[in-house]
Image: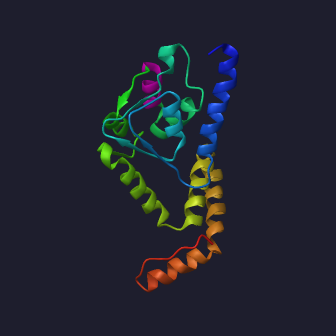
Amino acid sequence: MTEDQVRAFVPQLAAVCRAVAVLPFPTIAAVRGTAAGGGCELALACDLRVLSDDARIGLRETALAILPGAGGTQRLPRIAGLAVAKKWIFTAQLFTAEEAQRDGVAEAVVPGDRLDDEALAMAEVVAANGPVAVRLAKRAIEGGFDLSMDEALALEWQCYEGVLGTSDREEALQAFAEKRPPRFTGR
């Protein structure tokens, strides 16, 4: 690509990653094959990552004399810590699924033929919880990360207040008392 094409493309890719990252509900990346550069950045924009055991993932940009431009330099350290982010970005290596899990980038590694089922099973576990609570928990986690502890705790309480008047909360209490699974409606 020409410099002008890069200047047009990279912000578009960053915007796609940001659009995924700011979705109000949890997202799960199911990674098979190779997720390098922008593919890795898209996976990092998701809340959780499941990799097939033969997957390879990494931010290869510095080997191409560029740097991750779609959020990788910001999301990876928040997910895996500064040392891991520096190792991944400075070395420009592709990492195995097991290495990604060890480094805290992947939540699960499964055989390739089970990847879709595992990602769906993880989504079902999340979806079984109160949808309003899950959305507000995501808001509290994401919004509070860069705040002072006092500000973050205030945000957490603000989000907690958002679940107090919900019918889902009442249903959860009733279901607990009746020793049955709750039936959430998202209200």
x and y percent of residue 172 in the render? 51, 77
**Coloring scheme used:** rainbow
Q: In front: 129, or 114? A: 114
Majority SS type along the magenta span: helix
Query: Residue 164: x and y, percent?
Result: 63, 73
Residue at image position (45%, 80%) is: 176
Q: Residue at x 69, y 21 (%)?
A: 7
Give the camera-side residue of 39 and 48: 39
Q: Which residues are magenta?
A: 83-91
Residue 84 is inside the magenta segment: yes
Q: Is residue 129 magenta-colored?
A: no
- What residue lies at 47% left-to-right and 22% top-to-bottom? 60
**Residue 48: image x %, image y %?**
46, 47
| Image quarter of residue 14 | top right
85 up-or-down from 156: above or below = above
Residue 127 in the figure: left or right of residue 114 = right
Find residue 95 and report its horizontal and vertical position in percent.
36, 29
Quadrant location, the N terminus = top right
